[in-house]
Image (spheres, grey):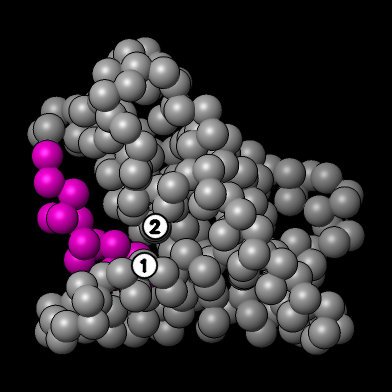
Amino acid sequence: MTYLLPILGVLLSFAFVYIAKPKNKEHFKLLLAFSGAFLLALTVFELLPAAYAAADAKTVGVFIMFGILFQIFLEFFSKGAEHGHVHLNNEKSAFPWLLFLSICIHSLLEGFPIEKHDTIIYGILIHKIPIAIILSIFLLGSKIKLSNALFFIILFSLMTPLGSYIAANFDFAIQYYAPITALVIGLFLHISTVILFESSEGHKFNLRKLLVIIVGITIAYFL
């Protein structure tokens, strides 16, 4: 299930967009807010304590900060697709290689902690579904060939399981568990907080989003 769930989440999201053809990405804001809160809470409740228990606090802190900076760097190329924004020109037929590479690197890294923290798979899955839906809306609404869009989505779906496989079978991933986990924590902290800030719609009070965020945090606490 560790390997299968992320793949199914992405592929079924693509199939949903292909069949239902939703046009408005605004409809998925509540799901994005829930995913951001859920992922942030799992990171705080599970990954942070484990990382600090496994290595020197200063080292963990440095790698968390590096993870935040690295995610900001990736977003120069992905244009924020990891938190539900795709700002590329959908009139172009050229394959978006920079978007593809940056989002695949992000997905590969987020698979590493799953090996020792099986509940984090649910946070990643809930995070992936709205992102996959929004990416699919962009890909299917652009002039990119359907075969290229499928290539993008299939490889994207495989990246997180590949990260989990590397973490379970490669000595360097086992040896450097704490710094790699800290790096991923930085990615998660940046992504989840950006999602929560952006879901506030100009800092206006929104009861539905607040309730969704509280539900996400509560579910994460009891996992």
Residue located at (64% from left, 64% from top): 69
The residue that disc 2 covers is 83
Q: Which part of the image, by quadrant, shows the C terminus?
A: bottom left
At 18% from the left and 49% from the top, the residue drawn is 25
Task: Classify 101 as above or below 220.
Answer: above
Horizontally, residue 67 falls left or right of residue 119, namely right
Instruction: List x then y, in percent, for residue 8.
Output: 38, 39
Magenta stretch, overall SS: helix
Question: At 21% from the left edge and 62% from the top edge, which residue is drawn?
Answer: 29
Mark 2 is surrounded, within 10 Å at the Cα level, by few (under 14), some (14 to 19) or many (20 or more) other residues, namely many
For the magenta stretch, what is the residue range?
A: 23-36
- From the viewer's perspective, is residue 182 above or below residue 112? below
Q: Are marks 1 and 2 in contact (CB under 8 Å)?
A: yes
Q: Amino acid at mark 1?
A: Ile
Check disc 1 and report the residue beneath it. 195
Q: Is 204 displayed left or right of 3 in the figure?
A: left
Element class at badge 1: helix
First in residue order: circle 1 vs circle 2: 2
- Residue 125 appears in view: no
